[in-house]
Image (cartoon, rainbow, N blue to C red):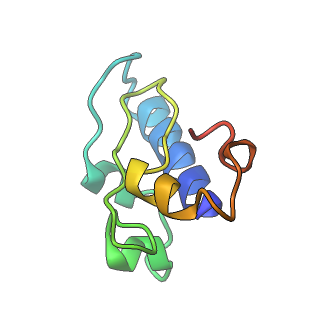
């Protein structure tokens, strides 16, 4: 889960650098997908986490966040500090 968040964050950063997007620019899932390995779990299942909750694709220069429903579902076993900086 944390790795998926990191991969999305990295893909948004790579996309914004390559296409000269400024902070606050919209990013589509298709843009992110271009920077993921096509054999990866995240690429194949789309923008959903292990619970099926959709990742919200951040704007350029905005930090990726864990889906609220996933955070709530895992809050008993994963403290808020586990999600830092993605909460």
x and y percentages locating residue 21 in the rendered image = 36, 23
Task: Please report the residue visible at 40 percent of the width from the left and 24 percent of the height from the top.
Answer: 20
Judge by depth and name the residue closer to the eye, 5 or 10.
5
At horizontal 48% and vertical 41% (from top left) the residue drawn is 65
* Nearer the observer, 45 or 75: 75
Quadrant in which residue 43 is drawn = bottom left
Q: Quadrant of the C terminus?
A: top right
Which residue is most to the top? 23
Image-based side of 83 in relation to 69, left or right: right
Name the residue rendered at 36%, 29% in the picture: 59
Does 32 sit above or below residue 9?
below
Q: Give the side of residue 46 with respect to residue 75, left or right.
A: left
In this view, the residue in front, 83 or 2, is 83
Q: Is residue 70 above or below residue 81?
A: below
Q: Nearer the viewer, residue 21 or 85?
A: 85
Please identify the residue farthest to the front as the structure is shown. 76
The residue drawn where x is 36% and y is 60% is: 33
Q: How many marks?
A: 0
What percent of the width, then of the height, locates residue 53? 33, 63
Image x and y of residue 35, in percent:
46, 57
Q: Is residue 1 above or below residue 31?
A: below
Q: Quadrant of the N terminus?
A: bottom right
């Amino acid at each position: 889960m944390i790795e998926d968040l990191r991969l999305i964050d990295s893909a948004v950063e790579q996309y914004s650098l390559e296409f000269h997007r400024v902070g606050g620019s919209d990013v589509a899932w298709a843009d992110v997908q271009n920077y993921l390995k096509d054999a990866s779990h995240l690429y194949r299942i789309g923008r959903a986490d292990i619970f099926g909750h959709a990742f919200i694709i951040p704007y350029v220069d905005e930090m990726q966040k864990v889906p609220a429903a996933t955070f709530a579902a895992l809050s008993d076993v994963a403290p808020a500090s586990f999600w830092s900086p993605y909460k």
